[in-house]
Amino acid sequence: MRPPSQIKPHFTDEEMMDWLRDAPDRPSYQRRLAIWLTHRERFHTAKVADLLQVAQPSVWKWIGEYNDKGPEGLERKGRGGRRWAFLGWVEEQTMLEECHVRAAAGDVLTAKHMLDHVRARLGHDVSLAYVYRLLRRHGWRKIAPRHHHVKFDPVAQEAYKKTSAVAGHRRGRRSTSRTHTPPVPRRRQVRPHQ
């Protein structure tokens, strides 16, 4: 039979017992007790997992973390979170701010337009779905286009409205005040079949 796991001596037996008693909560006590039972009682991981009512891979993980990092290895805050990323959060924010500057200058900004910018920044190919997830992660959302251009000038627009009737009129065009009725097509006479 395989021997029980070896625990590295980060503590003496008395220090380990004090460390076990000073556990702040139940999950910490459970992890520390797994180390204690493996070290002091020389139980196999299957026996420790059965006594603590946890999965055997959990006990293996706790022993490995304790052996690698010491007691601090067991004081983790869960397994959730973003495990990998092409860019960090701040780098993604600065990249989106660059795109925001382009949008403020009047460019129409869509995920497809941003895709080339993101690919250039990362240095490798990413999918369009990555850009959509990036935008969602930073709170960007779909917004309707502006109702007027950034360089919109209401005074110039009113001046154009006043002068456009004269400047926009084409020669040789009939006035729209006349009504023209198209000729009614004649119906063919129907003959009896012979």
Image (cartoon, rainbow, N blue to C red):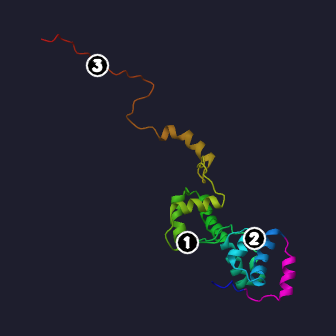
Dot 1 amino acid type:
Arg
- Tell me the number on the disc at residue 82: none
Instruction: Determine whether the residue tagged by mark 1 lies in a helix, strand or loop.
Output: helix
Instruction: Determine whether the residue tagged by mark 3 lies in a helix, strand or loop.
Output: loop
Residue 161: percent from left, percent from top: 56, 40
User: Which residue lies under the disc numbered 1?
Assistant: 121
- Tell me the number on the disc at residue 52: 2
Range of the magenta residues?
Answer: 7-24
Q: Residue at the front extreme?
A: 1
Tell me whether circle 3 and circle 1 mark residues in contact (CB < 8 Å): no
User: Which of the pair 25/106 is nearer the observer?
Assistant: 25
| Residue 61 forms part of the magenta stretch | no
User: Which residue lies under the disc numbered 3?
Assistant: 185
Location of residue 6 by image quarter: bottom right
Residue 7: percent from left, percent from top: 73, 86
Query: Which residue sits at x=52%, y=63%?
Result: 115
Question: In terms of sequence position, does the residue under pointer 2 or pointer 3 come before the other?
Answer: 2
| Alpha carbons under labels 2 and 3: distance apart | 96 Å
Instruction: Determine whether the residue tagged by mark 2 lies in a helix, strand or loop.
Output: helix
Residue 110: percent from left, percent from top: 54, 56
User: Which of the pair 41/163 is nearer the observer?
Assistant: 41
Question: In terms of sequence position, does the residue under pointer 3 or pointer 1 come before the other?
Answer: 1
